[in-house]
Image (cartoon, rainbow, N blue to C red):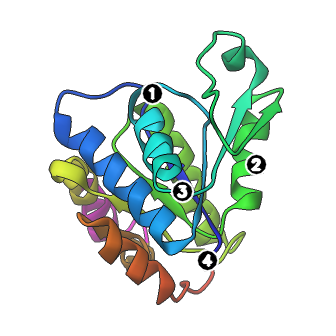
Amino acid sequence: MNKVAVYCGSSDGASDAYKAGARALGRELAERGVALVYGGACVGIMGAVADAVLEAGGQAIGIMPAFLQNREIAHRGLSELVVVETMHERKAKMAEQADGFIALPGGPGTLEEFFEIFTWAQLGLHRKPFGLLNVNGYYDPLVELLRHMAKERFMQEQYLSAMIVEEDPARLLDRFSAYTPPAVKTY
């Protein structure tokens, strides 16, 4: 695995644990020689994960729409900043570059990006590992909702188990290395 896309919030969140989790993931990526591909901002959890990667000697690649760069939130110290026109282009470019996908705590945008990747896995559009870094139990309610979806047969069980959920970045990345993609969704 050469590059991992990380989806996460542009704010710090209510707990210092979120920023600490982002920094721990950033250090772990750098130590493993895995480049970070992310939204390119210097603020919030996004900035924390990128700063940690860079401080540990790793590579951080930001992909940001021009309208956000113009708001002066682009991280100025990245290994590379790719400026695109739209959010759709950003997501496509991140998916194209990444060998796996992780969601750190974040809001609706983080979930939207992660669920697109989740859906693409179900449809067989990619066979890459994807998961949640469940910092401070942040994603516990979401995991419970997904279990409910499977129980109510709005999602096949194999896709629930295809999503990797861990509280520790090293364990999450270890499981990424051993990932076996699910079969393509059937009806």
* Sequence-wise first label, 2 or 1: 1
Q: Residue furthest top?
A: 71
What is the quadrant of the N terminus in the image?
Answer: bottom right
Secondary structure of the residue carrying numbered label 3 = loop
* Sequence-wise first label, 3 or 4: 4
Which of labels 2 and 1 is toward the front?
1
* Sequence-wise first label, 4 or 2: 4
What is the quadrant of the C terminus in the image?
Answer: bottom right
Rendering coords of residue 49 (x, y %)? 44, 45
Which of labels 4 and 2 is toward the front?
4
Q: Residue at x 18, y 42 (%)?
A: 17
Rendering coords of residue 163 (x, y %)? 41, 70
* Sequence-wise first label, 4 or 1: 4
Disc 3 residue type?
Gly
Rendering coords of residue 118 (x, y %)? 53, 61
According to the image, label 2 marks what residue? 92
State whether residue 46 appears in this view: yes
Q: Residues within 10 Å of mark 2 (few under 14, many from 20)?
A: few
Which of labels 1 and 3 is toward the front?
3
> Mark 2 and mark 1: span between their CA atoms?
19 Å
Residue 83, placed above or below residue 149: above
Q: Residue at x 67, y 62 (%)?
A: 98
Disc 1 residue type?
Ser
Residue 127, placed above or below residue 34: below
According to the image, label 4 marks what residue? 1
* Sequence-wise first label, 2 or 3: 3
Disc 2 residue type?
Ala
| Pointer 4 with pointer 2, Cβ within 8 A | no
> Mark 1 and mark 3: span between their CA atoms?
23 Å
According to the image, label 3 marks what residue? 57
According to the image, label 1 marks what residue? 10
Task: Report the span colored magenta.
Answer: 145-155
